[in-house]
Image (cartoon, coloured by chain):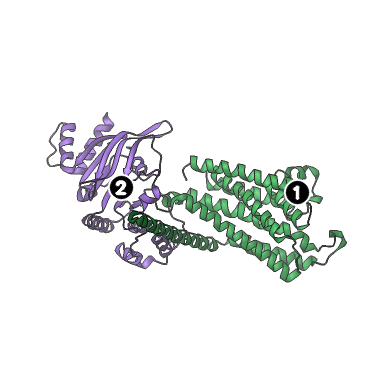
Amino acid sequence: MNAVIQVENLSVHYRHIQAVKNISFSVKAGEIFAIIGPNGSGKTSTVESMEGLIHPAKGQIRVLGYDPQKEKEAMYRQVGVQLQSSNWPLQIRVKELLKLYYNLYPTPQDPQRLLALLGLSGKKKHTVSKLSGGERQRLSIAIALMGNPKLLILDEVTTGLDPAGRRGIWNILKKSREQGVTTVLVSHYLEEVEALADRLLFLKSGEIAYQGSLEGFAQYAQHTLKCDTHEASLEDLYLRLTEAGWED
Amino acid sequence: MMSDEIFTKQKSVLKKDRTRMNTTLFLTEFKLYLRSFYGPFFALVFPLLMLVLFGSIYGNEPTPFYGGRGSMDVMMPGNIALILCVSAFMGLPLTLGENKDNRVYKRFDATPAGKERVILIQILVQVAVTVIGVFLQLGVGWMLYRVQISHLWLLFIGVCAAMYSLFSMGYLIAAASPNLKITNAICYTLYFGMMFISGCSLPREILPDSINRIAKLFPLTHTVDLLNGITQNQSLSQYWLSWAVLLGGGTICFLISLYLSKKNAW
């Protein structure tokens, strides 16, 4: 399969802090690729570099063949993004926001269908300020899907959602994969990664600790922790690995 | 030949998409602007209330005191300057500052529109509101008090130069301020300070010399001087300094604000 995202030797600095240290990886077409790691491990910096929202100190990135820094407009015609921290104008109504986003893309989806899909049909006339945290999160997913994207980049997509809402999003992502959409998923919920991801990237202190399949992650953990990890879930392995990191 | 045709077709589709994008963004931003009470009130309604209030007190009978012009003829440049000041120091920087603080631009930066386009459209909305406000002022002034404005085209060019200067300063305030509270504090201080010393609400002749010297440092003073010069049919040599200050100062503010908005993440 072709690489949809190619990241080579990426480094990101914030003044004196090196958030990402010379990492390289690729994301294949049609897969759900998860990025996991403890807080401050460089997940959002990596993703925002791929989105062209921050300028990396070093490295090359190609997203669907585009340079995210120089060809942003062309790239975003095919990429849907859900950001970890950002907002919309608070006085805009849900239907106005969807109409606005509808007109930003060359081949948009039907806004009514998206609202129904995300359970927001009854909130059309509400302003963004009147939506709950979970509703805003669902709205941000509707907007990420608006442009019929080939690639979805989702940063903590189910944060703030109740279990039913989370499962609903999982189903949407699974259906998108069936339709050939590639997804990069940054998540702290390991059960979510376990349920959705084809491959994962485990970042620790800005470096790649592991990249590969979920099955391979168990072997990596066994090797790193030097103990039997056969019965352990992904979350158990992750917790033990990150605890080991703190002890270091 | 075939690939040329495809390329031309793609280009025309792209142009159409961009036009659709720009139109929707403009209309949405305009709607959001109208939805806020203070912006439209102070830019469109308040200057008209001032016009009607002063017009009903003083009328617009020509007097020798004003060189054969009426009170409202003389006050019109100040009223126009006030509209420009509202958009430049209350409308634009507060809109930019609020969106910057709420990280709205980041959200638009992750779309084909990009944050630069959204900022440009927000500036255009303020320009449109200002132009509407100026035309309303001139129109109502003429209808109620037969306010006479000579050199309408030159006045329009003067308004554009003043908008460039004042809006650039407003943009600079939004770009340089670390947060919305500071943007608010600077904007309110400048707005009310300039309003009283620039000659747009009180005649500068009644102010002490020291205040007049300070007033000369602010672009609103030069806006009032420029618009007065144009409407009073003065020769260019009498108000060339105002052109220079507005265009030069505007360019400096614009370049610094561009640098700051690129340096700091919006």
Residue at image point 45% right, 52% down: B104
* In-image side of B96 versus A154 (left or right): right
**Which residue is at the front of the view, B251 or B118?**
B251
Chain coloured green here: B
SS at circle 1: loop
The quarter of the picture where residue A111 lies is: bottom left
Residue at image point 36% right, 68% down: A122
Percent across and percent down for residue A82 are 35, 51
The quarter of the picture where residue B47 lies is: bottom right
The quarter of the picture where residue B177 lies is: top right
What residue did someone put label 2 on?
A64
Percent across and percent down for residue A104 are 40, 58
Q: Chain of mark 1?
A: B
Q: Colour of chain A?
A: purple
Q: Is residue A101 above or below residue B146?
A: above
What residue did someone put label 1 on?
B239
* In-image side of A93 versus A147 (left or right): right
SS at circle 2: loop
Q: Chain of mark 2?
A: A
